Structures are given as structure tokens and as C-alpha cells.
Image (cartoon, rainbow, N blue to C red):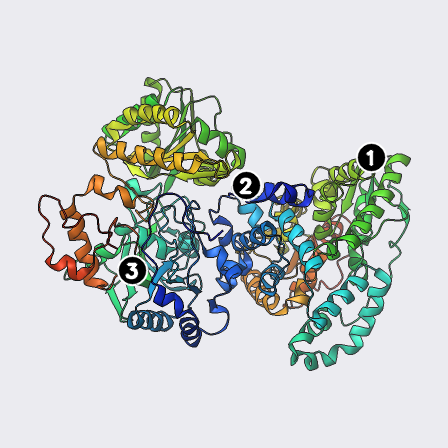
Amino acid sequence: MSGNATSGIVMPEPNADVIARRAEIVAAMRAIVPGEGVIDAVNEMRPFETDGLTAYKQLPLAVVLPSTTEQVSRILAYCHRNGIRVVPRGAGTGLSGGALPLADAILLGMGKFNRILDIDFDNRTVTAQPGVTNLGITTAVAHAGFYYAPDPSSQIACTIGGNVAENSGGVHCLKYGLTTNNVMGVELVLITGEVMRIGGKHLDSGGLDLLGILVGSEGLLGVVTEVTVRILKKPETARAVLVGFPSSEAAGECVARIIGAGIIPGGMEMMDRLAIHAAEAFVKVGYPLDVEALLIVELDGPEAEVHHLIERVAQIASELGCITLRASNSEEERAAFWAGRKAAFPAVGRISPDYLCMDGTIPRKALPLVLARMEELARQHGLQCANVFHAGDGNLHPLILYDASKPGELEAAERFGADILLLCVEVGGVLTGEHGVGIEKRDLMPSMFDETDLAHQQRLKCAFDPDSLLNPGKVFPQLHRCAELGRMHVSRGQLPFPNIPRF
Amino acid sequence: MQTHFSLAQLADPHIADAEQVLRACVHCGFCTATCPTYVLLGDELDSPRGRIYLIKDMLENDRPATPEVVKHIDRCLSCLSCMTTCPSGVHYMHLIDTARAHVETTYERPRMDRLMRALLAAVLPHRGRFRLALAGAALARPFAGLFDGVPALRPLAAMLRLAPSRPKLPSATEGVGRFLAEGPRRARVALLDGCAQPALRPEIDEATIRLLTRIGVEVVRPAGAGCCGSLTHHMGKEELALANARANVDAWWRAMEDEGLDAILVNTSGCGTTIKDYGHMLRLEPAYAEKAARVSALAKDISEFLVERELPAPVIPAGLRVAYHAACSLQHGQKVRTAPKELLAKAGFTVLEPAEGHLCCGSAGTYNILQPEIATRLRARKVANIERTDPQVIATGNIGCMTQIGSGTAIPAVHTVELLDWATGGPQPAGLHLPAAAA
């Protein structure tokens, strides 16, 4: 087993010349990062061959684990000088394959950057190294009644650096925004090795919004070595309501009516029967098992407001024929309601050996239609699908269950997933909500953007990394050479020589 | 996760079990965040997910363990924090146990490492030999610094530093015995007669037996029971571990047949985790499988047993500040999380919970001897978190943690049961010096 990416995803052709110089490159890396920070034994590199998207695997040229910005700078400068590709990696929890290695690339693991550098309660900011976990930031300030709002389900393990790369969301983004709305500044190392700082401890720095470009750039523009985020005071009161419905359509309608009534919940999540059962098996908090769809609606703010809003939500839910309605009465109970939702993805591991977690976003009003069409697709592809989603902002996470050891199932799962995402685009939505494009949705990009759109996005990439050394093969279906792009004439979406593969 | 085992490989029940564990893993990475070695080292190879992958690769390819793989497996504390975190229900404990056995049979360790492990396996599980070793260690302690200079000898230095400066004399509660309930007998239990604990701190068993008999529980220690086998089990020395397990099953089985047992109590949570796993460890031996499963089902940590009973009202002034250190074997291995804190609070103590309570203190059986550097860093982190709560005493349910934490702080570390015994009429725990007003 070479461990090459299976199925139809084509990655950039490895540079044989770079692979031939492996020993020399490893020695150069060792000179920069001493001790155990350079890993080149095949069996030790094996655990790095994949991330949270296990369907694709590839051994890197070498794994390098720096621990200082200076080391990152020297590594990138070396790679730049010598034409070596670099794939950055945080905790490796990403679900779109953003950290999938390349055979001729250094895998740059940021796990050793795990310290919090500054907590500034006056300015309400935390500055952390990129390998600090998302939850680690909240833990560091919780004692003073603060928290960091974006909370991806993997927040226990995913890193803030990875959050910046993917513009991660989470259940509380409906009200408090995605990563991009909560990052105030970063320290960034460019492929040349140059260290730059963008933003600071305040919102809206002068000049072009470079921060807006960097957040969500999936490791294609630079390597973040420091992140300053905004922290928020914990709401005075937060209570979650569990609402169970006999049909997904009714639950979808409930979401629409709550938003329609002008209520903005702190979070509003939906799970279908399969996901409810898997999550309940892990957390055992008493999710109702006799419902088709479960909503978790969290309301936060002053006590009187929360009390009032819970009554209104309860009224809307009752009008739509909910079967269960339970509001949390303690902080423990609220946390317990969420625990199942947060662990829902991996909990599906209890009912299926493998799953593909999709990530698409649709206009909220299309929810009942999309749910019905997905059921049809499941039958068509002969695979089960568990649904977990951020219902409040229309961000779907269908989990396609498959068994990689059964021939053909991965491919079927991939086709099913692509159909779901195309459906999202068809109803006026987008390919991704928060997991990023990576390799998973790379080849679907043209269904959403035409060649002109893509070419413009790639010019931005070229401005930062003209040799395309940072994380090539991700995000763009065909990464054109920058020189070519500069003078390429794209007419009516037709590229010259469309059959030439471009990376 | 997808696995690649041949039918021939799967015919081996150990591999078949490992395959089941591996297939449950979905590679989500949640476990990395709560793994003490990943938190310290930031290298996925020193995280559960990395080790799972290394083990998978080694077993799938039927490959002898390589020095690199052994390094990362050896660094695992077996604290099982990952199992608490894992939403997919991956039984990491059984996987790492299988891997350790594979290492032991396929890898030849460097000579000093081999000797050190043989020495530990030969001495620790035998109370007499261990007591002799402790006496020797007390004399050799001033020379610990000499061993620090030679990497291969560092475990010796670590061992000398952990040994108590004054060895304890054997207690009357040691060995075979029967301790009658005060008043009417409400229950009858066997109490594990461990190996290292009675030599290091006999007061724990004394307090346990006093407290149990005080509440009407008869305690027996049948002949033939002894070390639970976990020390050798975690070194991959399966035959030694299984011999211990069989001896204990036999001894307790006789006690069950004889007058019946309501529980098999363990006051060293490291041992408890292993005894509760006897059913799995001996599953392939027809003569033992069923008996071992019964024994595992009857095994309880002392705190699990006590929390279901009425304890006498406290007779000491309330409010002593106790930092509760959750031993990994108790909180992760046995999932006993609230019972000790509940018991302490009911007995009038003010229970403090240090930050990062899920992280191991570095003791982990013989880990603090075999991996002194990581163990010392973990101890420093643990002690700092404990001291931040400003406690008067530290309570925990495992002798390993007591020794480890106690060697890094001036705050006395005692067993939870010693405090409970004291609060309900027993003597003040040894080493607990309190200002006159508080005592």
C-alpha cells in the first residue's frame, strides 16, 4: 500500500527532483529544528498521512514540527529558495482534507505552538499561539466570566490556527459570527520567510482588509504563528430548549418561524433520528428517541428576556405539533444538551465504521425541500445519511455512512456527497459553511464559480505565493501558474487548452 | 477507520479484538486534546490518535516493533484520559495492552532498559522484596545524583527519589485475615491485599478496615490473593500478569463459594482498573473466563462502595480544605468521578477541584521510574494546579499518585479513605499536621 489518495481526486504531480533531494532537505530541516521536531522515518510519518477526512491518504516528504516563529520563518525561506512545497497542519481535525500531505511537500505541524501569550481583559482580547485549542482559549478566560464565541463541534481539539485557516463556525455563530468576525489580528509568515503582523487588538485596522483575506484562506497564503481574538463576557443567562418533532419538515418550519419572529437564538441546531440515537448512546442525557428531528435552541441574555423568549419559542413549537419540549434548568443541564450535539460526528462512529461529513449551506427556507431531496438521494445511492446541522444559519452537515472496507462504498459516498452539495448550490446556497473547500469540495468549485471568478481568486493567491508552494492542490480545481494567469485571456469562461492539467 | 487485516491474522483473537477497536476510531482527533503527553510535547506521535495509527500500521503489517514505535508506546501513561474524551467509544486500553504485549515479544530492548524492567517486574509485585528494596533505597538515596549523568541509569535515580526516606514496618492488617464487623454484619467483602501499597503506606489499609468494620462490613483477605498484576501487565509481561490474575480469581472465588462476597474492594485505583478488566484479560481461558468475569463484576473501588452506604456523622470540625486529586485510573479507567468528592463533602471537608483535573500526575504505575523526564514535568504541572487552590491536604485514591505528588510538594497527600476514617472516629492521618485550631 503506497497510501496514495484513493478514488478520483487528482493531486499535483510530485516533483521528482525534490523527492530525489529528500536526504539533503531533511538535513536542512534538522539544522533549523533540532531534536525530535523532524520526522522522516516512514512508520513515524504514517500517522500524519491523513487528517479528519480519512478517505484520502498520502505520506509527506517529511514532517517538521517547529516551535518558534523564527524556525517557521527559516523553514519557509528555505522551501521558497529551493522550490519545496509546504502543507501546514494544525490539530489535523479538518473535515475537508486541507492538511492532506503531498509526496514532495514538507508537512508543517503547528502542534508545538500551544501557549497562550497574552490575556487582556481591558481590551477583551486573548493572544494565542496557533496550536492552542479553540476551547483552550475559553478555558483560559472562563474564571473571569469570559469566553471565545465561535465554537466548532471539534472545539476540544481543533486549534485556533486551523480555525483561522478554515474560517470555522460553530453553534454560536448565528448570533456571534464566524472566526472572521472574532479575529482581531495575526502574525503571519509568508512563503519568503518574511514575518508580518496584520491587525492588532482592535477592530477594523486601516488600509485594505488583509485580515478578511487571510481568514479562511486554507493555508494557501501564509502560515499563521500568532492569533489575537476577541473574547466576550458570558451572557447573564443562557438556557437551551430541546424540541422534538415527528417530522424533519416541521422542525425546519419551526426554525424558519423562530427567525421570522425576530428572535436570534445564541444557537439553533437540528439533528435527525440517526444522529440523535448515536449522540444519545454517547452522552446519555435523555434526548428523546421517539422523534424524527430534534432542535436545540439556546437563548441567552438578561434573565427576563431569556424567560420571555423561551415562552415564545415554546409557543411556536407547540403550534407546529412538537412532541417534546424541555428547557434546561441548570448550567449542567444546558451543557449536557449540547454535549450530545458537539460529539454527534464522532458518535456516529458507533454506528458506522466510516463516514463522510459534508458541509453545505442553503437558504433557510429551502430546508424542508433539501431534507426531502436528501432522503431520495440516500435511497438512490444506497447509503444511510445522518443529519446534523446549524439550522439557524442554514449550514448543513449531512454525515454519509459507509464502510471503506466494502469495495465501491467510498466512491458511492463521494458521489452522494457531491450530489448533496450540488443540490445546495441549486437551491441558491453554497458549497461550504465552515469546513473549508480543501480537496473535498475542490472539484465542485466550478459548479459555483465560473472561470473568471476562480481566476480572480487565484490572482490573490499569486500575490502572496507566486510559485504556488503553499498547500497546492487544495481549494482550486486547477491552480494555474501565476505567470500564465497574468496574461491569460479568459473568454466566455473558456480556458485556452482546457485539457492541459494546471496546478 | 478502515483496516487491512488478512483472515489469517484475524484468526488470532488478540488481533481480532484489536481490529474491532481500530474500526471504531473515526480519526476525529478529539483525544489529542486531553492526552497529557500531547499537551506537553505537541507531537501527534505522542497522542492517542498517533499511537493508534502506529499500532494499526504495526499490527496490520505483522511487523516487529521498531525503536521509534516503542518510544511512543512507552511514552503512553495508560491514563486513559482519551477514553473519557472519545465520542466513538474506542477501547484504547485494550489496544495499547495488545501493543505492549506485541512489543514485549517482538522487540529487544537495550540492555539497561531490559534489566531495569526485569528488576521492576521481579521486585515491585512482591511485598517482601519490595520492602527490602525500599530499605536499600533509603540508604542509597543520597547517591541518586550520581545516576542522573548516565541516561540509561536515570530510572534508578528516579526510583531512589520516590522511595520514602524511612521504610514502614509491616502492619497488623497485612496478609491473610478476617476482620469482623462491629455490631450486626451488613455486608461481607474481600479487600485486595496489594503489593506496593502496604509497604509504602500501611495506614491506608488500616483506615479502610477500621472504617468498613465500623459500618458493619466484614472484611476478608483470603489466602492466595496478592498483586493484581497491573504493573507487569503495563510492561507487556503478559504471562506474569495473567498468573497474578488467575491467583486472585482463585482466591476470591473460594471466598465467594465459602460465605459469599458482596463486593471485592480495592483501595488502589490503579489495581481496581486492572481487576475490573480480568474478565477481558482471561476471556480466552475456558477455565477462568466465567469466574474472571464474575470477579470483575464484583470489583469496586472503595469510594463506589462507601457512597452507597450511610457513614456515621463526622466527629471532627468541618471545613478542612481538601484538594481532591482524581487518579486517572479512577476517573478515566473506572469512570468513578463523583463518589470520592461526595463522600468528602458529606464528611464535612471543603472539597477543592484543581484545574486540569483530567491530566495525569505522571505516576502511572512504573512510568515515573521509566520515563522520569515526562513524569517530572507532569508532576510540576499537577502540583502547581493543586497549590493554586491553597489546600491544607490533598486527597486521592491511588498510592502511586500520593507518592508522585507527595514528592513534589510540602502539602501532605493522603488517601481519601484515611480522611473519611478520621472524620468518622479514626485517628488523624499520619503526616497531616494542622494548626491546633483546625485539628
Pointer 2: residues within 10 angstroms few (<14), some, or many (20+)? many
- Which residue is at the front of the view, A7 or A471? A7
Which numbered circle lies on residue B186? Answer: 1
2 and 1 marks on the same chain: yes
The relative height of residue B43 versus residue B342 in the rendered view (above or below) is: below
3 and 1 marks on the same chain: no
- Which residue is at the front of the view, A182 or A502? A502
Residue B254 in the image: x percent, y percent?
89, 39
The relative height of residue A214 versus residue A373 in the rendered view (above or below) is: below
Residue B245 in the image: x percent, y percent?
80, 48
Residue A440 in the image: x percent, y percent?
34, 44
The relative height of residue B121 versus residue B317 in the rendered view (above or below) is: below
Tell me which chain the residue with mark 3 is part of. A
Q: Amino acid at mark 2?
A: Ala
Can residue B235 be seen here? The reply is no
Q: Amino acid at mark 1?
A: Arg
The relative height of residue A306 versus residue B18 in the rendered view (above or below) is: above
- Which residue is at the front of the view, A335 or A121? A335
Query: Which residue does the numbered mark 3 point to in the structure image?
Result: A123
Q: Amino acid at mark 3?
A: Asn
Can residue A182 be seen here? The reply is yes
In the displayed structure image, the side of residue B332 where residue A246 appears, left or right: left
Q: Quadrant of residue B13?
A: top right
Query: Which residue does the numbered mark 2 point to in the structure image?
Result: B24
Q: Quadrant of residue B264?
A: top right
Between disc 2 and disc 1, whose residue precedes?
2
Residue at the (49%, 43%) spot, across then down: B26
- Which residue is at the front of the view, B323 or B106? B106
